[in-house]
Image: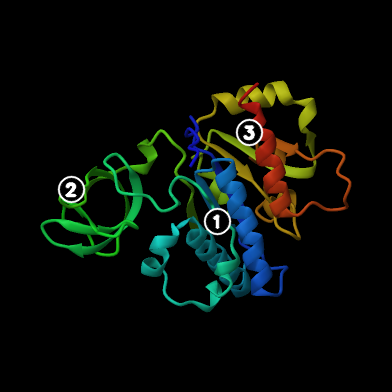
């Protein structure tokens, strides 16, 4: 499997909790989130943040579904039965496209140096890890049962042994994590966790007009955030409810699909288009 280098920056994407609220059937919700997850992995996004764009129990349930589905998709197939119980929300998960990131490998023979995601299934003075091999992997540490972790194999004979690895220190892109809290978009922006904030809008500045400035800021940022609106509301409307406007909240408000030939671009389509544009900037 091809392995892409990890980005020098931590790219975060903010998605609305109502992302799939306009779709009545779970099968189509599942398909949309599969499309979203492929974009996140394709463009080496590290973090997907699900924000509260509206209040109400219906939106809260939808946000929980999005978190669950994206986390399920991000989990390697050989670990899903250990980490997810039978759940009606996941009844169409079999239709999801595989991510095919290095953390989702085809069948591999265990060899020292191999990286794998694993789950602790036995714990004592040493812990036994399910990592998708015929045999469990021993890690010489006492670890909580059911904990998910990343390991590197250190020995394959006479038994499999491994060591814990911090995913953020890997030199290859390993996948994305999903974060959901009861936080609004203004709260995320005000946290000042990010050194570059970008929103996407049809009414935004044509990306072609500011490419040099955008490229400079993008390449110098260490933790950029790209924000997407909901199927029914753009970023200006979402921010306005908290008394904020785009110009004060965002470093850039971009139209990444200028001269669009359709009346509306869906959130998941904007995600693919915007991440593709920003990806190109790295080579400039």
Q: Residue at x 62, y 73 (%)?
A: 58
Q: Residue at x 64, y 55 (%)?
A: 35
Residue closest to the eye, 48 or 44: 44
Per the rendering, the mark at residue 205 is: none
Residue closest to the eye, 195 or 144: 144
Q: Residues within 10 Å of mark 2 (few under 14, many from 20)?
A: few
Would residue 19 be visible to someone looking at this image?
Answer: no
The residue beneath circle 1 is 98
Horizontal arrangement in the rendering, residue 171 relative to residue 215 (left or right): left
Residue 279: image quadrant is: top right
Q: CA distance from mark 2 to mark 1?
A: 31 Å
Per the rendering, the mark at residue 279 is: 3
- Measured as percent of width and height from the top left, residue 118 is found at 32, 55
The image quadrant where one finds the C terminus is top right
The residue beneath circle 2 is 157
Horizontal arrangement in the rendering, residue 6 relative to residue 40 (left or right): left
Q: Residue at x 64, y 73 (%)?
A: 26
Verify CB contact (< 8 Å) between mark 2 and mark 1.
no
- Measured as percent of width and height from the top left, residue 245 is found at 71, 44
Q: Sequence order check: which comes first, mark 2 or mark 3? A: 2
Would residue 131 be visible to someone looking at this image?
Answer: yes
């Amino acid at each position: 499997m091809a392995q892409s280098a990890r980005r020098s920056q931590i790219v975060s994407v903010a998605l609305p909790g109502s992302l799939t609220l306009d779709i009545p059937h779970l099968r189509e919700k599942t398909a949309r989130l599969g499309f979203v997850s492929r974009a996140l992995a394709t463009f080496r996004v590290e973090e997907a943040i699900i924000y509260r764009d509206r209040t109400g129990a219906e939106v809260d349930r939808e946000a929980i579904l999005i978190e669950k589905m994206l986390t399920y998709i991000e989990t390697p197939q050989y670990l899903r039965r250990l980490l997810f119980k039978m759940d009606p929300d996941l009844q169409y998960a079999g239709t999801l496209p595989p991510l095919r990131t290095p953390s989702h490998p085809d069948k591999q023979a265990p060899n020292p140096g191999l990286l794998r995601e694993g789950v602790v299934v036995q714990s004592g003075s040493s812990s036994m890890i399910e990592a998708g091999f015929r045999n469990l992997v021993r890690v010489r540490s006492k670890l909580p049962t059911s904990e998910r972790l990343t390991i590197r194999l250190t020995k394959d004979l006479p038994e499999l042994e491994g060591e814990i690895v911090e995913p953020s220190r890997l030199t290859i892109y390993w996948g994305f994590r999903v974060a959901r809290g009861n936080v609004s978009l203004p709260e995320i922006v005000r946290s000042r966790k990010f050194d570059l904030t970008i929103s996407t809008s049809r009414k935004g500045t044509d990306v072609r007009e500011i490419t040099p400035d955008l490229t400079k800021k993008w390449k110098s940022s260490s933790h950029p955030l790209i924000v997407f609106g909901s199927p029914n509301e753009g970023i200006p409307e979402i921010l306005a409810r908290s008394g904020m406007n785009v110009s004060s909240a965002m470093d850039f408000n971009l139209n990444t699909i200028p001269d669009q030939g359709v009346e509306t671009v869906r959130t998941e389509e904007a995600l693919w288009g915007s991440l593709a544009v920003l990806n190109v900037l790295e080579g400039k």
